[in-house]
């Protein structure tokens, strides 16, 4: 419970915590105190930081597809082109509002399954991948089919930045490959 007079303090502390996670150099506590017109001391800021982290049980970062991609790609024995394709499929899905209901690990699993199909890799879903993903092919198939529809719609989508990014040689130009323009 935050008292009304501590709302600004909570905002400064949220900024402080986020900057520690995202930035290479967090702001100094003295600077945070200064931007509040010295309404809060360093001790106030550190005390609220401890309270916020305790309330969050130190869970300050949510899992993203990137947390799961390397392990699943390793289990599948992906080469560079397939890695780029998996990431392309995931990033296409991430900009589609209806796909956000899926867990990040499920998106990566579906992208891997779909990439195996597009690249004609067998088996489509090996035991090693199933073990690493903790999902069966049957569990992943519906999301992979949704992802296939996102891929089909990509050339006509309003947002083209993902396609532009994955047209570059740095990403193996996977957005330009014929199977990325599937019917």
Image (cartoon, rainbow, N blue to C red):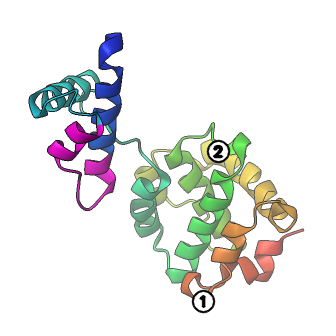
Q: Quadrant of the C terminus?
A: bottom right
Q: Is residue 181 left or right of residue 1?
A: right
Who is closer to the viewer here, 70 or 62? Answer: 62
Residue 131 inside the magenta-drawn segment: no
**Which residue is located at x 63 percent, y 36 percent?**
101
**Which residue is located at x 42 percent, y 51 percent?**
131
Instruction: Examine the rendering and report whether any part of residue 120 can be seen.
Output: no
Mark 1 vs mark 2: in front: 1
Q: Quadrant of the N terminus?
A: top left
Magenta span = 19-35
**Which residue is located at x 72 percent, y 54 percent?**
147
SS class of the residue under badge 1?
Answer: helix
Quadrant of the image occupied by residue 43: top left
Task: Please identify the residue farthest to the left as the structure is shown.
Answer: 43
Please, what is the dominant secondary structure of the magenta stretch? helix
Residue at which label 1 appears: 169
Label 2 crowd bin: few (<14), some (14–19), many (20+), radius 10 Å: few
Label 1 crowd bin: few (<14), some (14–19), many (20+), radius 10 Å: few
Q: How many numbered marks are there? A: 2
In this rendering, the answer to whether 120 lies above or below 19 is below
Q: In this view, does 81 lie to the left or right of 22?
A: right
- Image coordinates of residue 23 in percent, x first then y, are 30, 57
Instruction: Examine the rendering and report whether any part of residue 23 can be seen.
Output: yes
Task: Please identify the residue farthest to the front as the structure is shown.
Answer: 37
Q: How far apart are marks 1 and 2 (CA)?
A: 34 Å
Mark 1 or mark 2, which has the lower sequence index?
Answer: 2
Residue at which label 2 appears: 138
Q: CB atoms at circles 1 and 2 under 8 Å apart?
A: no
- Image coordinates of residue 117 in percent, x first then y, are 69, 67
- Image coordinates of residue 39 in percent, x first then y, are 22, 27
- Image coordinates of residue 105 in percent, x first then y, are 50, 48
Q: In this view, does 114 lie to the left or right of 104?
A: right
């Amino acid at each position: 419970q935050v008292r009304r007079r501590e709302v600004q303090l909570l905002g400064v502390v949220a900024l402080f915590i986020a900057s520690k996670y995202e930035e290479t150099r967090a702001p100094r506590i003295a600077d945070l105190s200064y931007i509040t017109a010295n309404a809060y001391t360093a001790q106030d800021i550190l005390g609220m930081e401890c309270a916020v982290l305790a309330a969050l049980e130190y869970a300050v970062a949510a899992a993203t597809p990137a947390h799961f991609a390397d392990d699943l790609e390793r289990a599948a024995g992906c080469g560079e082109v397939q890695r780029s394709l998996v990431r392309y499929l995931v990033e296409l899905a991430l900009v589609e509002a209806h796909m956000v209901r899926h867990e990040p690990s499920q998106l990566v699993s579906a992208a891997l399954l779909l990439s195996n199909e597009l690249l004609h890799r067998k088996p489509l879903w090996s035991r090693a991948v199933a073990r690493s993903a903790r999902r069966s092919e049957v569990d992943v198939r519906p999301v992979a089919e949704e992802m296939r529809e996102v891929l089909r719609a990509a050339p006509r989508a309003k947002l083209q930045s993902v396609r532009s990014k994955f047209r570059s040689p740095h990403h193996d130009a996977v957005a330009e490959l014929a199977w990325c323009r599937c019917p």
